Image (tube, rainbow, N blue to C red):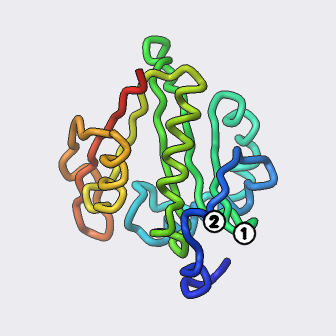
Amino acid sequence: MSTRNESSKYTAKDVKIRYATKEDVVILKKMFNKVVQEKRFLPTLQEIDIEEVENGWLDFRFQNSIVVAEIKGEVVGQVQLERLEDAAAQHVCEIGIIIDPDYRGKGVGSALLEKAIQTAKHLGFEKITLSVFSTNNKAIKLYTKLGFIEVGRREKQFKIMNKYIDEILMERFLT
């Protein structure tokens, strides 16, 4: 993994977006765990192990999409598009984005979110939903810029390091 100084020379034009492959599983797990360790952006405080990810990969990938961002051949971000399970909600896609901390502010999130919107439309979804910590101002600003609106808030939904954090619920209609 590059250091922050090395990654600072990259810009949005260096970001390549593609669908994830099974070969990405190890780096995605490492990136997820790196973000978990920050205790700032994810409701889980539990790191995942590689066997758990590998065993569920094909089942998950069959029903959902995972898109990754690369810079110079290195995976630095991901967005998951998950179809809701309820039959009456099959038109709704829920997304989650993770960006390697060393590559934030480089256009990775914008590129991933734009691809997620295109992919959701292509797959026939009518609406995208997401949730974000109320303390994640940069993400909220990005989501708003790309057409998401706040539709709800769960007060004190998470407690991390003895601090309460609200969960903001956002959505964007695609039709």
Q: Residue at x 72, y 42 (%)?
A: 57
Along the viewing direction, whichever of 28 and 10 lies nearer the viewer: 10
Compare residues 103 and 155 and report the one nearer the observer: 103
Mark 1 in CB contact with mark 2 (< 8 angstroms): yes
Q: Earlier in the sequence, mark 1 or mark 2?
A: 2
Residue at x 49%, y 71% (from the top left corner) = 37
The quarter in which the C terminus is drawn is: top left
Residue 8 in which image quadrant = bottom right
Q: Amino acid at mark 2?
A: Asp
Residue 42's image quarter?
Answer: bottom left
Above or below, 118 relative to 76? above
Tell me if 41 is positioned left or right of 59 in this view. left
Question: Residue 13's quadrant in the figure?
Answer: bottom right
Residue 85 got which mark? none
Question: In the current view of this chain or complex, which residue is farthest to the bottom?
Answer: 5
168 over 74 or under it: above or below: above
Is disc 1 placed on a helix, strand or loop?
Answer: loop
- State the residue position of label 1: 72
Q: Nearer the viewer, residue 127 or 90?
A: 127
Residue 139 % position (x, y): 36, 57
Give percent across and percent down for residue 62. 71, 30
Of tags 1 and 2, the one toward the viewer is 2
Q: Residue at x 57, y 65 (%)?
A: 33
Label 1 sits on what residue type?
Lys
Q: Residues within 10 Å of mark 1 (few under 14, many from 20)?
A: few
Residue with the mark numbered 2: 14
Q: Is residue 31 above or below residue 143?
A: below
